[in-house]
Image (cartoon, rainbow, N blue to C red):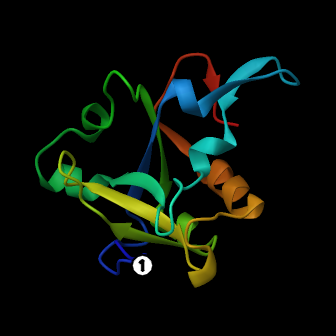
Amino acid sequence: MAPYDESGIGADDLIIRRINPHYHVIFDDNRQCRRISSKAYSPSSGPDAGMSIDVEQLIITAGQQPQQYVVDPVFTGAVAFSASSIRSLGLWIGYEPVHDNPYHGEVWGANPSRHNKFTKTQKDGLAAAAAWYVSIDDVALQ
């Protein structure tokens, strides 16, 4: 799907990023703790690939419990951001349902030449804006 910014996602809507400890959690030697890595705040590879997310309001509207919906044996935690905090970083949010997840979306870079790349400032901004949605024991947000 071509990147775009969905006007139906309001500024206060919660955007959920699932966390897979195998890929998104590292041990920080400086702080002597486990924490979420910057990889969690990066898009997938590919020309129009974005950062995979779920839109909380879609899950709720469908009658699902979002904190239960976003975890499974692979994704044991999740963080959330307001849509406005994502957009304030120069990023777009759009719906991109997939066969097993109708609430799926993507976050893309708004710059047409860099849709699938986030700057360090954008990654750091996502990390700063993130709040636990479903926490993982003994893992720090930053």
Q: Hey, which quadrant is residue 45 in on the image?
A: bottom right
Q: Residue furthest front?
A: 46
Q: Position of residue 41 (x, y in %)?
A: 60, 50
Picture residue at 65% right of the left edge, 63% below the top: 118
Identity of the residue drawn at 61% across and 16% down: 138
Q: Residue at x 11, y 52 (%)?
A: 62
Is 128 placed left or right of 58 in the picture?
right
Please say if 65 is above or below 49.
Answer: above
Q: Residue furthest right?
A: 30
- Asked whether, in this view, residue 81 is left or right of residue 27, the answer is left
Please state which of residues 58 and 93 is positioned toward the viewer in this rendering: 93
Q: Nearer the viewer, residue 119 or 137?
A: 119
The N terminus, quarter of image: bottom left
Callout 1: few (<14), some (14-19), or many (20+) C-alpha neighbours within 10 Å?
some
Q: Could you say where residue 71 lies in the image, as x and y percent from the top left?
A: 33, 30
- Residue beneath the point at 48% across and 61% down: 50
The residue carrying mark 1 is 5
Q: Position of residue 85 (x, y in %)?
A: 56, 65
**Mark count:** 1
- Specify whether 11 is left or right of 62: right
Look at the numbered disc 1 and give the secondary structure of its residue: loop
Q: Quadrant of the C terminus?
A: top right
Choose top left, top right, bottom left or bottom right for residue 64.
top left
Q: Amino acid at mark 1?
A: Asp
Does residue 36 lie above or below 88 as drawn?
A: above
From the viewer's perspective, is residue 21 above or below residue 12?
above
Q: Nearer the viewer, residue 58 or 105?
A: 105
Q: Position of residue 100 (x, y in %)?
A: 19, 45
Q: Is residue 131 left or right of residue 65?
A: right
